[in-house]
Image (cartoon, rainbow, N blue to C red):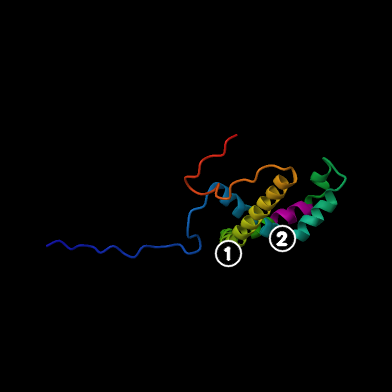
């Protein structure tokens, strides 16, 4: 008689519950960069003030500030920071959805006002319903 192995429980990564699209990954990356720049804001400010008004000479004149800035950014650019940025992105997902819905509602109200102002016929309200006929152009 053969021993059957029982499959183990499925491992779910709760930190990153679903794969993201490339645009969503870009948003996570922007959060990550923003967080790292936030940690190193003083070093970045020092380098920028040193490099202000310089061109090629900034390479050697601001070497200490550049190295301090780069070391700070390298020290804070870690997988833990990427994970924290991804968690922040997932935590604010509902807020972004509400903002999009509010923006769409404002757009519709503005379009309705525009059509009324110029005496254009109103758009049908159910133009987004599935199976609705396309508007003629």
Horizontal and vertical percent for residue 70? 70, 53
Residue at 42 percent of width and 62 percent of height: 12
Asked which secondary structure carries label 1, the reply is helix
Residue furthest to the left in view is 1
N-term mark: 1 or 2: 2
Q: In the image, is residue 69 above or below residue 137?
A: below
Q: Position of residue 7 (x, y in %)?
A: 28, 62
Within the magenta stretch, is there residue 63?
Answer: no
Quadrant for residue 91, please give it: bottom right
- The residue under the point 86% across, 48% down is 52
Please give the name of the residue rendered at 68% of the width and 53% of the height, measured from the top-left corner.
Answer: 109
Q: Quadrant of the C terminus?
A: top right
Query: Looking at the magenta stretch, what is its main secondary structure?
Result: helix
Give the structural element (helix, strand or loop) at label 2. Answer: helix
- Answer left or right for 18 relative to 11: right
Residue 98 in sight: yes
Which of the numbered marks, if any, corresponds to residue 38?
2
**Near-viewer residue (106 or 46):** 106
* Image side of residue 17 versus residue 84, left or right: left
Direction from residue 3 to residue 48 in the image, left or right:
right
| Whether label 1 touches label 2, CB < 8 Å | no
Boundaries of the magenta span? 64-71
Q: Residues within 10 Å of mark 1 (few under 14, many from 20)?
A: few
Q: Which residue is mark 1?
A: 91
Q: Nearer the viewer, residue 31 or 39?
A: 31
Can residue 33 be seen in this snapshot? no
Residue at the location (72% across, 50% down)?
113
The numbered mark at residue 30 is: none
Taking the view exactly as shown, the residue that stands out farthest to the right is 53
Instruction: Give how far across and how far down residue 2 sits, in percent.
Output: 15, 61
Q: Quadrant of the N terminus?
A: bottom left
């Amino acid at each position: 008689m053969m021993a059957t192995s029982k499959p183990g429980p499925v491992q779910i990564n709760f930190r990153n519950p679903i794969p993201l699209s490339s645009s969503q990954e870009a948003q996570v990356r922007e959060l990550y960069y923003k967080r790292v720049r936030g940690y190193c804001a003083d070093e970045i400010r020092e380098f920028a003030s040193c490099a202000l008004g310089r061109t090629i000479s900034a390479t050697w004149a601001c070497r200490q500030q550049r190295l301090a800035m780069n070391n700070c950014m390298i020290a804070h650019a870690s997988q833990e920071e990427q994970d924290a940025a991804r968690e922040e992105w997932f935590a604010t997902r509902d807020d972004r959805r509400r903002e999009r819905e509010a923006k769409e509602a404002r757009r519709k109200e503005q379009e309705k006002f525009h059509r009324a102002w110029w005496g254009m016929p109103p758009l049908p309200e159910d133009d987004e319903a599935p199976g609705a006929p396309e508007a003629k152009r």
